[in-house]
Image (cartoon, helix red, strand yellow):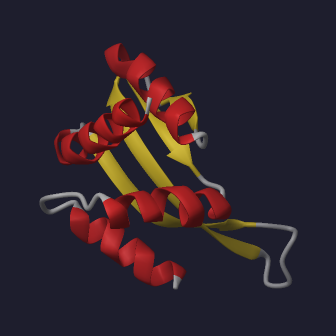
Amino acid sequence: MVTFSLLFLFLLVHLMPFCSYFYSFLSIFKSNRTKIGYAIQLMFKLTQNKRDKELLELVAKFMNCGAVYSHGENAFDLTVSKLADNQNIIIPMFKTYPIQGIKSWNIKISVKLLL
């Protein structure tokens, strides 16, 4: 099972630059829970064509975080919005298995924002 896990992580990280849409970002939204009326949330999203919904569900299950949501008629998102999941699962995964290519910049910025 360990071999499968390492292979899965390797494929996930090395195929991600070729995904339909991948990003992590800060979401700023209105919130009644804060004094200023706004909150900030770090999110990780991976968007794929609807034919790859099962793949996104497998990734969410494997990482034990995130959820898969419909993104229009033809796509699905794997979204990880819990801060703890981003800090303890997503960021360490990309530190251990860095993304290759231009999309690695997005992860580097997210890591700096969390620190």
Is residue 73 visible in the rendered image? The answer is: no
* Viewer-side residue, 42 vs 64: 64
Q: Is residue 37 left or right of residue 65?
A: right
How many numbered discs? 0
Residue 94 drawn at (x, y percent): 35, 61
Residue 114 drawn at (x, y percent): 53, 79
Quarter of the image where the N terminus is located = top left
| Residue drawn at point x = 46 percent, y = 35 percent | 77
| Residue drawn at point x = 66 percent, y = 63 percent | 84
* Viewer-side residue, 97 vs 105: 97
Q: Hey, which residue is sitting farthest left in the picture? A: 101
Is residue 79 visible in the rendered image? The answer is: yes
Q: Is residue 48 left or right of residue 113?
A: left
| Residue drawn at point x = 35 percent, y = 67 percent | 95
| Residue drawn at point x = 34 percent, y = 34 percent | 3
Residue 29 drawn at (x, y percent): 66, 65
Whether 108 is drawn above or below 56: the answer is below
Image quadrant assignment for residue 109? bottom left
Image quadrant assignment for residue 69? top right
Image quadrant assignment for residue 107? bottom left
Q: Hey, which residue is sitting farthest front in the picture? A: 2
